[in-house]
Image: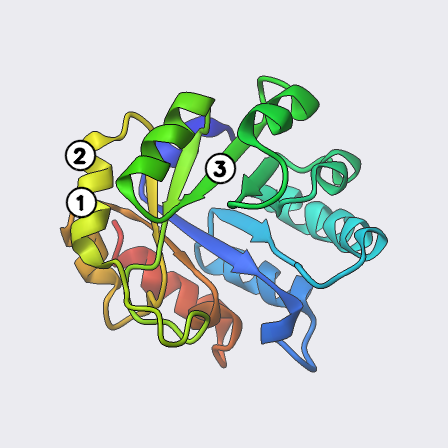
Amino acid sequence: MSKQLFSQPLLYLIATKTLVPGRSLVDTVAEAIRGGVDVVQLREKDMLKGQVIALAKEMSSIVKQKGKLLLINHHLEAALEAGADGVHLGRKGPTIREAREALGPGAIIGASVHDLEEARNAVEEGADYLLVSHIFPTDSKPGAPPKGLELLQRVLYNSSIPVIALGGINRNNIQLVAEAGCPRAAVMSAILTAENPRETAKSLKEMLL
């Protein structure tokens, strides 16, 4: 499994404990992978570094056992210690160049972008994929107007690397993402809060193919 995976239809799960209170995040992710998730990004912004590293190690064991990819949000040290496949970076924290220097040429480095300029800069700096957000209204960004499918299509047209759509994506609208020319989607609550994460992931993945 490698960077080549990102050139295919892909279901990307952003995993955080805050959305699964009372339930094991690792078990939930394992079920989602059985349903069709290809890439897992562990995102725990409020945890101490040691806690992130411990969870990343536990998550890595499960994800790699299933033959899928694990990325860690922001934490280069956690990615290294857990043997993750790479990192995902936002506006704050390490730069793409710093991550590449720390993790090496084989690591997968993704970048969150919110407009065409950010997308171009991330490509120039050496990102392996772009996470474009937010496409639809989402509870994680209350009051913020969505960027819509128009931005997604503009980034797709102007980018030389794979693009993944993020933001408010669920079974009711993921087909619109695929029809816009982007067979790659990232989700959080649609899977993490589902009664049956495996079946939900299976349904979402099928609509991207």
Mark 2 — residue?
A: 157
- Residue 196 shows in the view: yes
- Residue 177: give x, y in percent of width and height: 22, 55
Left or right position of 98 against 159: right
Secondary structure, mark 1, is helix
Asked whether the residues under the numbered discs 3 and 2 touch, taking CB atoms below 8 Å apart as contact, a structural biologist would say no
Q: Nearer the viewer, residue 63 or 148?
A: 148
Mark 1 — residue?
A: 153
Mark 3 or mark 1, earlier in chain? 3
Secondary structure, mark 3, is strand
Mark 3 or mark 2, earlier in chain? 3
Residue sitting at x 55%, y 50%? 40
Residue sitting at x 37%, y 72%? 138
Q: Is residue 160 above or below residue 60?
A: above
Q: Is residue 60 above or below residue 170?
A: above
Secondary structure, mark 2, is helix
- Residue 11: give x, y in percent of width and height: 40, 51
Q: Is residue 152 above or below residue 145?
A: above
In the image, farthest residue toward the top: 105
| Crowding at mark 1 (Cα within 10 Å: few <14, some 14-19, many 20+) | some
Left or right position of 8 against 195: left
Task: Kindly identify the amino acid type of the residue bearing the numbered disc 3.
Answer: Gly
Residue sitting at x 57%, y 24%? 97
- Residue 42: give x, y in percent of width and height: 62, 53
- Residue 131: give x, y in percent of width and height: 40, 46
Quadrant of residue 167 in the image?
bottom left
Mark 3 — residue?
A: 110
- Residue 67 shows in the view: no
